[in-house]
Amino acid sequence: MHRYANPARFLRLAKAILPYSSGLAVLLLGSGLWFALVGSPADYQQGDSMRIMYVHVPSAWMGMVCYVAMAVLSAMALIWKHPLADLLARATAPVGAAFTLLCLITGSLWGKPMWGTWWVWDARLTSMLILLFLYLGYMALIDAFDDPERGSKAGAILALVGAVNIPVIKFSVDWWNTLHQPASVVKMGGPAIDPSMLLPLLLMAFGFKAYWVTVLLLRGRAEIAAQKIRVLRLAQVHASSRGE
Amino acid sequence: MESLHALFAMGGYAGYVWPAYGISVVVLIGVLVVSVRQVRCREAELERLQGPRRERRGSPAGAGS
């Protein structure tokens, strides 16, 4: 019965957090957009094209943060059979996939004017594309079985194996020659970026985080409802097969 | 007015900057809308399935969409 234990505590918590996380997301993304597009200077080398960074970099961070969260939750689901961990891993995947897709699209739109090409098959770009495929593979796999528990298990194993890609993405710009510029914010010796550009970047980054929490709570609720519906349907089938 | 023109022109990079922001807004709002719909739809169905076991509140079971 533990597997179908009512995660009432999560639902209560979700209800309490939701207004704050959604309000925070609107506030941070609103001010972030203003600073990104209007209230910050253009780059002395890249001009206004550099403004793409304010969506590109936070998207890339979120693509990786969501994946790490998904892998940790999957490990919790496999090791401790924590029912909520599995639901939240499932709920995170589409959000992470969306951020990874945005990272690739905005990167392409930035690469064209700066590098002269929409795409190159170098380490950073290719490993990010693999991240998108890992998300899509996970989402396809968890729904590929008649028994949702088997789907979750297969998905969790895929998520854990795919986690090897995360350090590859992070260090790809140091390990291989690439068109992509190296890290300028998260690095030894502090960020090498002007405060006037760091502010919109951080506002957007935390805005994306608040957005993620908001969508995660909503999708978590949907997953819990779906599981309860399954249990109720099964109970109905059992009741009717015993003969009314 | 002058600054508004400058904003739209994006220093000649309007064709790259605005699509990047536009697609981001569309994708993020899209994911949010799909998630909200999913929650509403499933919680309504759950309500409907659990309905007969609880006190009827005037409306017949199955009326919810």
Image (cartoon, rainbow, N blue to C red):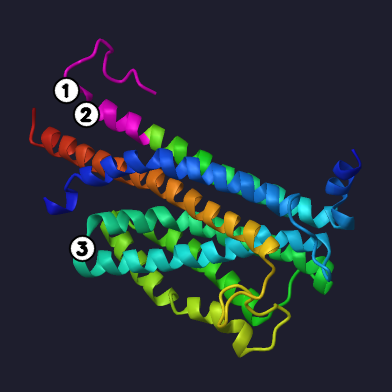
Residue that label 2 marks: B50
What amino acid is at disc 3?
Lys
Position in image of residue A131 (x %, y %): 53, 69
Residue that label 1 marks: B54
What amino acid is at disc 1?
Arg
Q: Quadrant of residue A109?
A: bottom right
Asked whether A169 or B3 is in front, the reply is B3
Label 3 vs label 1: CA separation?
A: 31 Å
Query: Does A169 appear above or below A206?
Result: below
Task: Tell me whether marks 3 and 1 sit on the same chain.
Answer: no
Residue A145: image tag: none
Task: Tell me whether marks 2 and 3 sit on the same chain.
Answer: no
Label 2: few (<14), some or many (≥20) within 10 Å?
Answer: some
Position in image of residue B26 (x %, y %): 64, 45
Residue that lies at the very extreme toward the top in this rendered image: B58
- SS type, badge 2: helix
Label 2 vs label 3: CA separation?
A: 27 Å
Asked whether A214 or A93 is in front, the reply is A214
Q: Is residue B46 magenta?
A: yes
- SS type, badge 1: loop
> Could you tell me which chain the residue with mark 2 belongs to?
B
Q: In the rendered structure, are the residues bearing label 1 and label 2 in contact, judged by CB atoms less than 8 Å apart?
A: yes
Identify the residue at horizontal 59%, vertical 55% (top origin): A204
Label 3: few (<14), some or many (≥20) within 10 Å?
Answer: some
Residue that label 3 marks: A81
In the picture, measured across the screen, residue A138 lies left or right of residue A148, that is right
Label 1: few (<14), some or many (≥20) within 10 Å?
Answer: few
> Could you tell me which chain the residue with mark 3 belongs to?
A
Residue A196 seen in the current view: yes
The span picked out in magenta is B42-65
Q: Is residue A73 magenta?
A: no
Position in image of residue A18 (x %, y %): 39, 41
